[in-house]
Amino acid sequence: MSNKLRILLADDHATVREGLGMILNSQPDMQVVGTASEGHAAVAEAERMQPDVVIMDISMPGLNGLDATAQLMKRSPAARVLTLTRHTDVSYLKQLMNAGAAGYVLKQSPAETLLNAVRVVAGGRTYVDEAMKPAANTADDPIVSREPTKPLSRREMEVMRLIAWGATNKEIAQRLSLSVKTVEAHKANGMRKLGMRSRVDIVRYAVLHDWLAQS
């Protein structure tokens, strides 16, 4: 039991919570340890239960999923928030990633997508639903089709991919046997070459170039 991923479900629809609970609890490596029907309760339950993953709906009464995610990251930073929503607008993806969410999955996607996403974010990486690619691929978004002003070096590419997966500078430094300052330099160079300003830009670029599909 102790080896199972501890999951908190936050959704204002009881039938959705019950259905998701059945799917998640049927997995040998997952256990739903709590539920919440609105944002304030989700933050409080996460602080009390200390789950590995919080599956968070966006549209909830009291406190919406976006604000709840931001609060949860301050009060329970070890938890990984996985957004589960019907919203396909890329602006929601950007806002949730800025708030600290580790993943974004559509309710329209198969159950296998959600299960995979739970395992990915629990492992410390970032997950974005494949179905979000068409939504992100808009003509007025310069990040989508931008090519580097200069080719990324091998190290810059490695660092950028690890950032997209959700790794911190310290974790990247340990993995690549580099100093944190060197990682920061590679990150800055890569972002400059791609004209990026935030981690959200890196994640969106990664989604569109299949970086997150690679291990």
Image (cartoon, rainbow, N blue to C red):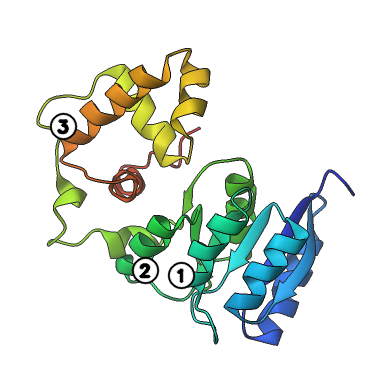
Under tag 2, what secondary structure? helix
* Snapshot quadrant of residue 212: top left
* Snapshot quadrant of residue 164: top left
Q: Are marks 1 and 3 in contact (CB under 8 Å)?
A: no
Mark 2–mark 1 distance (CA, rounded to whole Å)? 9 Å
Q: Residue at x 66, y 80 (%)?
A: 16
The amino acid type found where label 3 is placed reads: Lys
- Image coordinates of residue 49 in percent, x first then y, are 77, 60
Mark 1–mark 3 distance (CA, rounded to whole Å)? 30 Å
Q: Which residue is mark 3?
A: 193
Q: Is 140 on the left or on the right of 33, as rendered?
A: left
Residue 92's tag is: 2
Q: Residue at x 87, y 46 (%)?
A: 2
Which of the two labelled residues, at mark 1 and mark 3, occupies the earlier sequence position?
1
* Snapshot quadrant of residue 32: bottom right
Under tag 1, what secondary structure? helix
Q: Is 145 on the left or on the right of 14, as rendered?
A: left
Q: Are marks 2 and 1 in contact (CB under 8 Å)?
A: yes
Residue 66's tag is: 1
